Amino acid sequence: MDVAIYIVLMALGSTFIILSFIEKTKHPLFALLAMVIFALETISSFGITYTIVYYDSVNNTAKLIQVSYAETPLALLCLALALVGMFQFYALTFRKVEEAVREELVR
């Protein structure tokens, strides 16, 4: 992925995480979106493979070279943030369910 896309996704995911913790904007959807963004970024950061094609002029053949690398620190950071988003999503969802059950019991 391009570096600019990583920066935009990190900013977007971080914004959703922060919004899910602020009292006025606390909603499970923000945590879910942050979790999905960081999970996809984790997957793309762990195994990046690209292919380079070189032309061998001596043998008149094309050579394919596959290069693989992993951005481990970025992948682990995204994994941690995805887990934070997941736990926040479940906590907010269960809190909403608890509020709905209490309202039904009061009626």
Image (cartoon, rainbow, N blue to C red):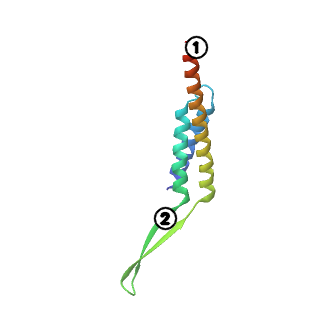
Decide which of 7, 51 is in the foreground and name it: 51
Q: Secondary structure at mark 2?
A: strand
Q: Up-down: is 59 above or below 75?
A: below
Q: Up-down: is 88 above or below 101?
A: below
Place residue 22 in its image quadrant.
top right
Q: Mark 2, mark 1: which one is toward the viewer? A: 1
Name the kind of residue labelled 1 in the image: Val
Decide which of 55, 95 is in the foreground and name it: 95
Name the residue at 57% across, 46% down: 10
Q: Up-down: is 12 above or below 67?
A: above
Q: Secondary structure at mark 1?
A: helix
Place residue 72 in its image quadrant.
bottom right
Name the residue at 63% across, 56% down: 73
Q: CA distance from mark 2 to mark 1?
A: 57 Å
- Reading the image, the residue beneath label 2 is 49
- Reading the image, the residue beneath label 1 is 106
